Image: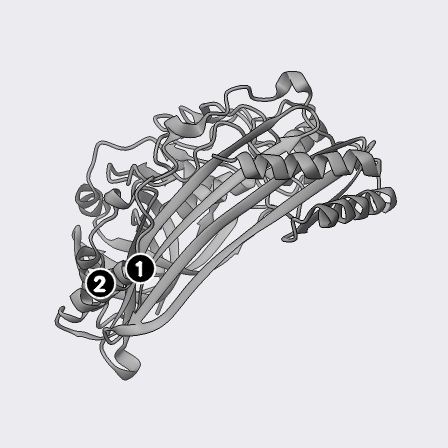
Amino acid sequence: MTQSLADLTAQILDAARKAGAQSADAIAVDGTSVNIEVRGGKLENAERSEGIEIGLRVLLGQQQACVSSSDTRPEALVLMAERAVAMAKEAPIDRFAGLAEPSQIATDTDCARLELFDATEEPDPAALQQDAIRAEAAAMEVQGISQVQTASAAYSRRRIHLAATNGFAGGYERTDRSIVCTAISGTGAAMERDYDYDARIFQADLKSADLIGRTAAERAVARQGARRPKTGTYPVLFDEKISSSLIGHLIAAINGSMIARGSSWARDLLGKQVLPTELSLIEDPHRPRTSGSRLFDSEGLPTSRRAIVDKGILTGWTLDLSTARQLGLESTANASRGTSAPPSPSAGNLELTFGDKTHADLLRDMGTGLLVTSMIGSTINPNTGDYSRGATGFWVENGEIAYPVNEVTIASNLKDMLLRIVPANDGERHLSRVVPSLLVDGMTLAGD
């Protein structure tokens, strides 16, 4: 599957050795992507890209440098390696840089069981265009829709291969298929916008274009007549569409790079309660047909399932080799990288414990408050966890939606918010981050 890319990474590593590198690792990526947009039932834009890129990191002791190129001719690879070595000689010493030990690297590199690649034939551009047209038409059929801002369909196929002088070599192939529709209701100053989309690894799993277009339109129409609520302190229900952003703030705070710098509001929370005791946050990099699944990370370490939060208690940071060395810990095999930079820690597939109540149950329980369906901007203090974001959604009275809301700011502190979350049972399990709707009591709302 990745033989040509394997040869390419072997060539660049050999060139790096000959240029004087003491150790090195390389990543090669090639792929094809197609994106079709329509407007008014006609083709608006068509893009297709194909290419290959290779990235090389060389180390001279604890000095390192990274270079990348799309020129894979043998002579270009030699020049690339020589430049990388020359750059490393001038780089500052990084006491924590270095490859994994041979005993640490993954030996199971057959990613077939993760089902990241759909062998179905690449869709013809005409088929993508038809999907976009169907989504647009379905949206325009909904009463109250004045126009469709975006209707598009896309497909991509990539191959990725990693190799290093410590003996690691592994790769995988990945496909993606998506449909997006953004609809606008009303006219002039009364216009409101909303969207729907779906993205899957396997084309057969994709939601229908008609459903995506209709859902986008219905959401846009429901936002008509939006107004600002009264300023005060209320419960806030984060809809499943955007609830993962709340957990995302916790994941960002426990990233090894933030912890190593001492610039995270979670820096003193290891081994302490960060979520309600009945909730756990699980990282599972081996979940099939999921975009964040990997058998190995970008440093060649084997990945494994772990409880980042276990029954409310924070159990560890998200680490690559460098941040683990800085903190005197072991890597959690969360290294991620592109072709032009060294690895850095990044979390993959996540799933938060579901609750036993439906979305409607939480609406009923909140009584009077705000259902947030989209967010605008972000002011998060990384040192204190102070949280302030613009939000739109629906005002809830007596447990039922009363009217749409816009131009409201919600604020609190992430430490307090996360300890008070109440999850629903409506998470989408095909997503990389499976987070249900989340109810948070006692947030400050700035409106009228």
Q: Residues within 10 Å of mark 1 (few under 14, many from 20)?
A: many
Q: Are dots 2 and 1 in contact, CB under 8 Å?
A: yes
Residue in view at x 65 percent, y 43 percent? 263
Tell me which residue sits at (28%, 83%) in the image.
Answer: 188
Residue 129, how many percent across, how many down? Answer: 28, 64
The extreme right residue here reads 90
Mark 1: which amino acid? Val
Q: What's the distance in space between the residues labelled 2 and 1, CA to CA?
A: 8 Å
Q: Is residue 265 left or right of residue 397?
A: right
Q: Which mark is residue 180?
A: 1
- Is 101 or 108 nearer to us in this picture? 108
In the displayed structure, would residue 145 be above or below residue 345? below
Q: Secondary structure at mark 1?
A: strand
Q: Is residue 99 visible?
A: yes
Q: Is residue 36 above or below residue 302?
A: below
User: What residue occupies the far top of the structure in this picture?
Assistant: 103
Give the answer, above or below, for where 420 lies relative to 132. above
